């Protein structure tokens, strides 16, 4: 630290000595990230001029490099946003609500030269964080998440001005707030080290005689490109093989029966021999002979099976669970109602909604209707919707009372989902409807280019979502919206012509199923790959039960078998045989199955 910055910090610290404030920096998350899938580049049309805006944390930062198109391109590329996406989506008018909500005028421009900006480094929680001021003399700071963006803005991390963390925070001499964090979609941390995108470290327990769930190592360099990886091994590792795949390194193998009590140490080094070098180490070992491997990676003497908790027949139509205790089932009134129960609503009802508050052990008929009701969705333990032929009903008290929201006796609504308490979609026979007021009013989405019919949809954020359906060329294709469902654009055909259902693991990772197997895309549908089906039983069209907790962990049901994946669908491991109509995992380690014979629980991941 030079003498001038030292004296400046000392003066401010003396100023703070008379204050009663606490260490406000500890209250901040400081979560500007090098890899954040929510970041995007938005093209904005301003009176005939095309502008580029980095959207991070709900705010818009205009990218500017006057008279230097190459510098502007570097700023765009530094964000890590795919250029294919940038060229695919049209520009939005400056006066549109979508752009106005970004408050671009209130944010500093991200320019290709520092200009009057000052670059700071602050030690927070043992890590070095980097900030810049919008103008000379300004004490309002913005945190930057990736190295490429700081470099494209002309900052040199070696020349960053040190700043005492006690001076930084809300209502402090240097004003910093988590809302002022600027992340990148793909890149490396500002500290100049590679960014690990995936790859375990520490200890991983494995089972003798089973296939190791594929390990995937991937790291990004300072410019967001794939960092070179080098793997070395020690111990009993002869059974483990590694394969480079599209910049990543995958490891797999059959764990031998003789591996019990042995270990294998794996070391993966990224950018070896450079200043960016970073290493991850992993030790593979087994549980003792009298133990089994639990979902949390620990060894214990416990069983891994499904336990029946209710011997009761339930309707075959849709069910949902939002927690380990609270769930609902919709369908015909046989089963529960045949035992003499009465339901509020139409009498006698042909279809009804049933609720449980004890994980399915007992059920209560909450609402009856003479119209067919087959589909439902609950946002939480209080707010939910059910639909079918002729309309939609909703509740805000967990099903104690239900209200009719939208009635069209000629329409059959096949699926309903809500992103939050206000914004939802419902799928009709050939149309998609949207609401922004919790279902009080519904509007039809615009026409889908080249579409004949919709089979399924998924929503990944308030503004973004995908629809899968049949095209005029008798293929299956994917459409995307970036305005909450007002308009959709055709992305690309899905290779499997039998694909009917779609599930999102994150904003860009999608899985399509229903035909001969499962297709996966990692870039929002621009390209697809077939997921390995090795060892999975079940014929075409059987992969219709699927859920992903994140882009790596998920499960599918094929016939009577339940399979799990921990590597994004590269491999699926068969866990249990269960003739279930539907399976739910309210949490990653607790499952509920609804079958013709009753309700089952499991604590296996």
Image: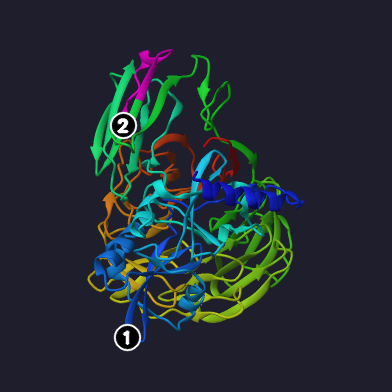
Name the spot of residue 106 as percent of width and height, x first. 52, 73
Give the number of the mark in front: 1 or 2.
1
Q: Is residue 297 magenta?
A: no
Q: Is residue 257 magenta?
A: yes
Instruction: State the SS at label 2.
Output: strand
Pointer 1 or 2: first along the chain? 1
Q: Nearer the viewer, residue 368 or 382?
A: 382
- Point out the residue furthest to the left here: 473
Name the spot of residue 328 as percent of width and height, x first. 63, 56
Task: Please identify the quarter of the rendering in which residue 454 is found.
Answer: bottom left
Task: Please identify the quarter of the rendering in which residue 140 is found.
Answer: bottom right
Instruction: State the SS at label 1.
Output: loop
Region of the chain picked out in magenta, as a range: 251-266
For label 2, the crowd category at 10 Å Cα-Cα, with few meaning under 14, some 14 to 19 and many 20 or more, is: some
Name the spot of residue 496 as percent of width and height, x first. 27, 56
Q: Nearer the viewer, residue 298 or 477?
A: 298
Vertical placement of residue 442 versus 519, above or below: below
Vertical placement of residue 265 versus 63, above or below: above
Residue at 55% in and 51% down: 30
For label 1, the crowd category at 10 Å Cα-Cα, with few meaning under 14, some 14 to 19 and many 20 or more, is: few
Spatial distance from mark 1 to mark 2, Cα to Cα?
Answer: 51 Å
Task: Please identify the quarter of the rendering in which residue 457 is found.
Answer: bottom left
Q: Is residue 412 visible to us here?
A: no
Name the spot of residue 313 as percent of width and height, x first. 61, 49
- Which disc is residue 48 wearing? 1
> How many numbered badges does the structure rendering display?
2
């Amino acid at each position: 630290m030079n003498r001038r910055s030292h004296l400046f910090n000392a003066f401010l610290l003396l100023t703070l000595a008379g204050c009663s404030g606490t260490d406000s920096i500890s209250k901040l998350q400081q979560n500007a990230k090098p890899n954040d899938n929510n970041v995007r580049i938005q093209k904005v049309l301003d009176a005939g001029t095309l502008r580029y805006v980095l959207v991070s944390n709900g705010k818009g930062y205009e990218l500017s490099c006057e008279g230097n198109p190459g510098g502007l391109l570097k700023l765009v590329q530094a964000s890590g946003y795919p250029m294919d996406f940038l060229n695919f989506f049209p520009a939005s008018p400056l006066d549109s609500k979508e752009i106005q909500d970004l408050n671009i005028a209130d944010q500093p421009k991200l320019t290709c030269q520092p200009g009057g900006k000052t670059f700071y480094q602050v030690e927070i929680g043992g890590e070095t964080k980097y900030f810049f001021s919008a103008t000379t003399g300004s004490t309002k700071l913005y945190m930057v998440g990736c190295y490429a963006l700081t470099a494209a803005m002309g900052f040199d991390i070696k020349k960053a001005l040190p700043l005492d963390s006690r001076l930084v925070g809300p209502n402090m001499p240097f004003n910093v707030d988590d809302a002022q964090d600027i992340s990148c979609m793909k890149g490396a941390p500002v500290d100049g080290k590679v960014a690990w995108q995936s790859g375990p470290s520490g200890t991983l327990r494995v089972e003798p005689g089973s296939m190791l769930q594929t390990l995937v190592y991937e790291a990004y360099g300072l410019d967001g490109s794939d960092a070179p990886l080098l793997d070395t091994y020690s111990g009993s590792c002869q059974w483990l093989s590694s394969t480079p795949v599209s910049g990543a390194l995958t490891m797999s193998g059959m764990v031998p029966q003789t591996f019990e009590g042995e270990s294998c140490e794996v070391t993966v080094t990224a950018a070896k021999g450079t200043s960016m070098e970073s290493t991850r180490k992993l030790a593979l070992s087994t549980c003792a002979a009298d133990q089994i491997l639990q979902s949390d990676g620990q060894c214990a003497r416990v069983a891994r099976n499904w336990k029946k908790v209710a011997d009761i027949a339930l309707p075959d139509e849709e069910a949902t669970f939002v927690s380990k205790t609270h769930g609902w089932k919709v369908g015909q009134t046989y089963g529960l109602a045949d035992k003499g129960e009465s339901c509020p609503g139409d009498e006698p009802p042909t279809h009804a909604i049933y609720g449980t508050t004890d994980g399915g052990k007992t059920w209560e008929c909450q609402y009856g209707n003479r119209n067919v009701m087959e589909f439902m969705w609950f946002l939480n333990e209080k707010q939910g919707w059910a639909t079918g032929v002729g309309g939609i009903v909703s509740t805000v008290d967990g099903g104690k009372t239900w209200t009719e929201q939208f009635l069209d006796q000629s329409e059959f609504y096949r699926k309903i989902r809500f992103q939050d308490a206000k914004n939802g979609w419902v799928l009709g026979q050939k149309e998609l409807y949207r609401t922004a007021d919790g279902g009080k009013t519904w509007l039809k989405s615009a026409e889908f280019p080249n579409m004949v019919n919709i089979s399924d949809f998924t929503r990944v954020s308030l503004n973004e979502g995908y629809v899968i359906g049949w095209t005029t060329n008798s293929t299956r294709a994917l459409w995307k919206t970036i305005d909450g469902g007002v308009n959709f654009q055709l992305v690309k055909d899905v290779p499997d012509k039998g694909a009917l259902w779609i599930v999102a693991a994150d904003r860009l990772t999608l899985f399509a199923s229903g035909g001969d197997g499962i297709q996966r895309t990692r870039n929002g549908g621009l390209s697809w790959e077939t997921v390995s089906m090795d060892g999975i039983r079940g014929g075409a069209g059987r992969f219709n039960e699927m859920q992903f907790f994140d882009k790596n962990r998920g499960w599918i049901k094929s016939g009577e078998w339940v399979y799990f994946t921990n590597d994004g669908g590269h491999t699926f491991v068969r866990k249990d045989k269960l003739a279930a109509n539907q399976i739910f995992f309210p949490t990653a380690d607790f499952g509920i199955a609804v079958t013709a014979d009753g309700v089952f629980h499991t604590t296996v991941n």
